[in-house]
Image (spheres, helix red, strand yellow):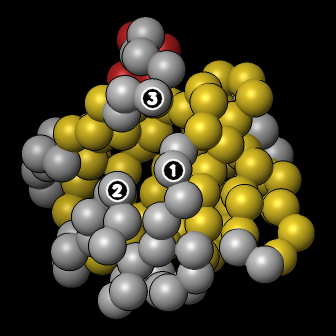
Amino acid sequence: MKYDIHTDIKYGPLAIVEAGRLAKECTEPWWNQTLARVNDSVVRLGVFLGEFHWHKHDREDEYFHVLEGRLLMDLEGRPTVELSPGEGIVVPRGVVHRTRALERTVVLMVEPATVVATGD
């Protein structure tokens, strides 16, 4: 699957972040845009349909928060976690994981700015 990942920071300090508009306008099946930087972390918006590859981050934790749809978080050696709108999960550094969405799903992610979206 092709991933459309944008690591440029779309909004600066004191700008109104239009995450809802960006999600509605997105037509890609797997899209990710960095919205803003907060201290040493970034906030990213993802629109997912399909599955990401298995990967891990050796030095960074990640937070996923579902806004729309359902997100499946596959965790190596553990049961899959299903997240509904309003729910989130922290994936600790070093945990092999992948995200899957059987329907169009919109997710906010918070992670250190050093994270490489495709894994280490």
Q: Which residue appears at 21% of the width and 39% of the height?
A: 6
Where is residue 19? Give x, y as percent.
40, 33
Vertical arrangement, residue 89 with respect to residue 18, above or below = below
> Quadrant of the rendered structure where residue 105 is?
top right
**Residue that label 2 marks:** 118
- Locate residue 15 relative to residue 22 in the image: left or right: left
- Locate residue 43 relative to residue 12 in the image: left or right: right
Name the mark nearer the viewer: 2 or 3. Answer: 3
Determine whether the residue tagged by mark 3 lies in a helix, strand or loop. Answer: loop
**Residue that label 3 marks:** 1
Q: Is residue 2 visible?
A: yes
**Residue that label 1 marks:** 53
Where is residue 116? Give x, y as percent.
26, 64
Lower position in the chain sequence, tag 1 or tag 2: 1
How far separated are the C-alphas under marks 3 and 1? 9 Å
Lower position in the chain sequence, tag 3 or tag 1: 3
- Locate residue 31 relative to residue 107 in the image: left or right: left
Disc on res. 11: none
Q: Which residue appears at 45% of the width and 29% of the height?
A: 1
Other residues around mark 2 within 10 Å, as few (<14) / some (14–19) / many (≥20):
some
How far separated are the C-alphas under marks 2 and 3? 12 Å
